[in-house]
Amino acid sequence: MSDNAGTRIYGNELKYLKEVLDSEFRSSRGSTMMRRFEEAFSERFGTKYAISFVNGTTTLHAALEAWGIGPGDEVIVPPLTMSATTFAVLQANATPVFADVDPETFQIAPDSIEAKITSKTRAIITVALYGLSPDMDPIMDLARKHDLLVIEDNAQCFLGTYKGRIAGTLGHCASFSLQSSKHLTSGEGGIVITNDLELAEQMRRVQSLGYAGVSATKGKITKRDIQDPDYSRHVTLGWNYRMGELCCAVALAQVENIDSLVGKRIEVARLFNQAIEGYEDWFIPQKVGNDYAHSYYTWVARLEKPDIAWHQFRDRFVELGGDGIYAAWQLTYLEPMFKEMRLLGRENFISIENKSNYREGICPVAERLQPRLAQFKTNYWNIDDAKRQAEVLSKTLASFA
Ligand SMILES: Cc1ncc(COP(=O)(O)O)c(C=O)c1O
């Protein structure tokens, strides 16, 4: 089936699902979708290791645990993103510290990261927000200087590039989500890539109950491993974060079509970029520098006309036939869970000084941006639907001019 058949499921999904069902989930009968998905993913991204997970939050948690991050350690994160980035830090019993973002690219800003580094900082989680990589070189310089782990949270970025390098190969490891809104999906799912063997081995153990029998490239223990009374299974604490074979089957088929799946979103974004021509002085798209290729999880602009309220703009777009506009997430540290310190006991690991930093004013750029951002979905699999949305956006802008 061709990639313009109006669906995102046009490859080997059903074929691979059938293979898993025919195998009755027995690896002895060849049910090895996890390994095949991991190999296909690492091959496409050009990394040595890829480890699949149930979602793109457990990936982040596993990377932090694998690096030995825990109580008392600080991890720098952006506040303008889906909060799972921060949740993973809390899940590891560590302390999230929020760095501000760039006013034009909306990405975590290296100078703000630098200002937030303390003697307790152990890691930085960057987020390629909306599908665009942050400015990674200065971030990696800081990481080298202060001996920090850098995890790229690329839940929203597949095949974006930075200075000619693929996003996801810039930090020490990178996490991806395959939840239903993402470039590739298996309904739910996640994967982490790295070139670091030790990190890969540890992440696999965290993913797989700390089993002795697993390794960076081996996700399942075998009968030989367990049919021995002297076998000691658990060399470390770990969780069952394994992605199921059925999800891996769909994910494998999606990786095979990754270029066209991502390409379609870029094509849709191009339509939105054309639609706003002439209005960019007050409806300003996310800046994409010359060194970057955006993968457009969504297409985003900031509304900078004081006499138009965000809701008014959204309502006009919908009245004229638009599908809707997503607002940016509330900044994580302004969510009630932080205001009320309802962190399922993790608040006990956070110092009073850090607690006092979860308040308005700590990331002024992100605070200014958040209420102004307008996010348009790019996952239209029929390009005519996207063209209609771009036309509606054009009409909406003209109606306010
Ligand atoms: C930036 C970011 N990080 C992490 C996640 C979490 O991924 P998942 O939903 O697969 O756990 C998401 C999901 O939307 C995300 O956008």
Image (tube, rainbow, N blue to C red):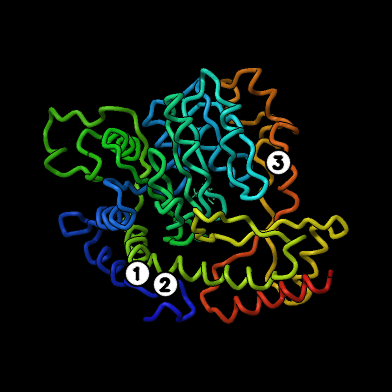
Question: Horizontal placement of 328 versus 53: left or right?
Answer: right
Q: Which mark is residue 13?
A: 1
Circles 1 and 2: CB distance less than 8 Å?
Answer: yes
Residue 87 against residue 155 in the figure, above or below:
above
Residue 255, image x, y percentages:
35, 62
Residue 29 against residue 369 in the figure, above or below:
below
Among the two numbered marks 2 and 3 on one chain, the one whose residue lies closer to the N terminus: 2
- Reading the image, the residue beneath label 2 is 9
Gap between marks 1 and 3 measured at Cα: 43 Å
Identified by mark 3, the residue type is: Val
Camera-side mark, 2 or 3: 3
Residue at the spot 60% in from the left edge and 27% down from the top edge:
115
Residue 388, image x, y percentages:
65, 79
Question: Horizontal placement of 197 versus 93: left or right?
Answer: left
Question: Horizontal placement of 20 versus 319: left or right?
Answer: left
Identified by mark 2, the residue type is: Ile
Secondary structure at badge 1 equals helix
Circles 2 and 3: CB distance less than 8 Å?
Answer: no
- Reading the image, the residue beneath label 3 is 365
